[in-house]
Amino acid sequence: MPLVGFGIWKVPREKTAQSVYDAIKMGYRHIDGAYDYTNSKEAGEGVQRAIADGLVRREDLFVTSKLWNNYHKKQHALEMAQHEVDTWGIGYLDLYLIHFPVSLAYIAPSELRWPCFWSDPEQKQVTAIDPTPVSETWAALESLVRTDANPSGILRSIGVANFSSQLLHDLLSYAAVKPAVLQVEHHPYLVQAGLIRAAQAAGVAVTAYSSFGPQSFVELGNATARDTQPLFSHQVVVDIAQRHGRTPAQVLLRWATQRDVIVIPKSNNAQRLAENLDSFSFDLAAEELEAISGLDKGLRFNNPAALGSLHIFD
Ligand code: NAP
């Protein structure tokens, strides 16, 4: 699994096919998508064009997508995984994650295509929790993984996102197919050192999302993000970047990858995409890694509890 991928949350749908194509041309081999990002079809078109043009073969790429919260019941998980594979149109997914450890009431895609956390198109009514054991969802996904006994499986591996260490340990206690990846918010303001240690010690690879901390959430109007000092201008990060002749973004990414944490930065800008990909040809000193980790303040930006009722991380 390539250490640096291209995350496509908030890549506008009309630009996604070209962005994914350009990213592959630039050298990206790992794309991180999700049903919830609403651009899987276009991302798949970008991948298909890159393959048709001979830039890559399908097997050179690592493509991730995710199961949204309204579809945790067995039948829905099976249907939505198949739907996502069909939508990308590239034969199979390399990794399929349970997007959040919360099961919300089912909403048929024909009723509301991309419900996110809401039950109405105006995004006013938060969808109620409709509990499903993770074990039910996991068993459904396991049945889709390609193995010798199941050669037509449409998923190459499965994993989880936004899980705590408790949930991960519980899942590991019964999983017949081990989670390959845990994807979590991870940046210097939210280091989650214990969670990362627990996952890696159990042989579960960790992927960081929102590596730039508040940056991704400022554009969503998130007040905490707006009021937080950007990591890009934090003196600790800036000094280290200057010492290495790198940008703060590259330092933030290297801080993760040097500790075996995979990164999936998103950018709608070609120059920044290239900068992000070129972020592991230098090494930070141990004390620089520590200094960056020392910025930790347990500050989470991607928290649906902000909507009032969806307490997942508390
Ligand atoms: P991110 O990659 O940390 O940050 C994106 C922001 O940083 C954008 O505003 C982008 O602006 C800017 N940026 C990117 N590269 C830059 C650079 N080199 N210099 C300066 N600014 C730069 O945030 P994210 O999109 O939240 O997270 C990355 C990916 O993780 C997502 O796309 C998604 O695939 C995944 N994710 C998963 C979950 C989950 O629940 N599993 C949640 C959130 C995200 P421009 O676009 O203008 O460059």
Image (cartoon, rainbow, N blue to C red):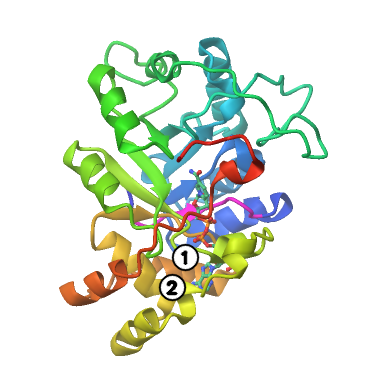
Instruction: Name the residue: 23% across, 70% down.
Output: 290
Circles 2 and 1: CB atoms closer than 8 Å: yes
Quick check: 272 above or below 307?
A: below
Horizontal and vertical percent position of residue 165:
30, 37
Dot 2, how many residues are within 10 Å of its Cα: few (below 14), some (14-19), or many (20+)?
many
> Predominant secondary structure in magenta?
loop
What's drawn in magenta, residue-wise? 3-11
Q: Secondary structure at mark 1?
A: loop
Residue 254 falls in image quadrant: bottom left
Task: Name the mark on residue 249.
Answer: 2
In the rendered view of the protein, which quadrant contains the C terminus? Answer: top left
Q: Is residue 263 magenta?
A: no
Which tag, 2 or 1, sits closer to the chain's start?
Answer: 1
Quick check: is the Cβ at mark 2 less than 8 Å away from ligand 1?
yes
Instruction: Identify the residue under disc 1.
Output: 212
- Identify the residue at the far right of this view: 122
The percent coordinates of residue 275 (x first, y second) are 45, 73
User: Which quadrant of the structure image shows residue 130?
Assistant: top right
Label 1 within 8 A of ligand 1 by Cβ = yes
